[in-house]
Image (cartoon, coloured by chain):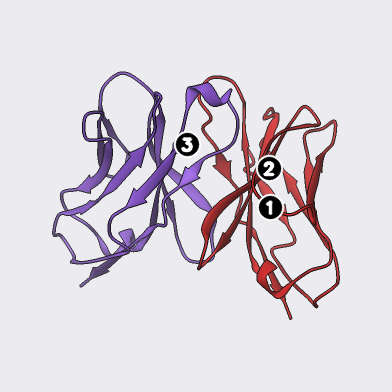
Chain colours: A purple, B red
Amino acid sequence: AQSVTQLDSQVPVFEEAPVELRCNYSSSVSVYLFWYVQYPNQGLQLLLKYLSGSTLVESINGFEAEFNKSQTSFHLRKPSVHISDTAEYFCAVSGPLSGNTGKLIFGQGTTLQVKP
Amino acid sequence: KAGVTQTPRYLIKTRGQQVTLSCSPISGHRSVSWYQQTPGQGLQFLFEYFSETQRNKGNFPGRFSGRQFSNSRSEMNVSTLELGDSALYLCASSSASGANVLTFGAGSRLTVL
């Protein structure tokens, strides 16, 4: 069975500082990996995804994540955060063997608090 | 291109009542999935519909049900509401081709009193 562990429930950081949100997954098969962001009173927005190919994936707003198969990790990083990055971030996993279904397994979420 | 639309956005019910939530997927998306989000349990998969058929189901009691119409719109129903059903219910759609990249709606926040 697949599972996702987000190692930090809250990450406080000052504006313009770098940040890393950690995500480890457990799966015996190949996986697809995702990071979603949720702002207050909103749904989830896809931040970035790893499906195949390059292990380093980037988003349009400066976030990046690296798929590390040997360490079964998919940590999210940003070199310089802004106040507007304050939100909850969810790591999720699914597998190609699940038959292209809409079932994602989510981590418990990490609240990123950016302080001025 | 319109996103995933969920209605209603907020609703309050009392224990024992039932509720129906609606989801309109992105045009052309044939798969609709439902998730429950609570502070204690996080995001949990309820079920997925594709071409009017349920093709995957999470670990929820039979009080939770859903359906999908020929235009891919979906509804979920919760009968005999319990206090613990208070949650944000999220709907997501995908084209169901290739990887399962989901686009989520803003959610329906249900409060059970």
Q: Marks 2 and 1: in contact by CB < 8 Å?
A: yes
Disc 3 sits on a residue from what chain? A
Q: Nearer the viewer, residue B7 or B15?
A: B15
At x 56%, y 40%, the residue is B103
Chain letter of disc 1 in the image: B
According to the picture, the residue beneath numbered tag 1 turns out to be: B60
Is label 3 in contact with label 1 (beta carbons under 8 Å)?
A: no
The residue under label 3 is A1
Indicate the secondary structure of the residue bearing disc 3.
Answer: loop
Residue B8 drawn above or below residue B59 = below
Q: Are marks 3 and 1 on the same chain?
A: no
Residue at the image point whose x is 26% and y is 22% from the top: A54
Under circle 2, the secondary element is: strand
Residue A2 lies, in percent from the top left, at 45, 38
Disc 2 sits on a residue from what chain?
B
A82 and A88: which is toward the camera: A88
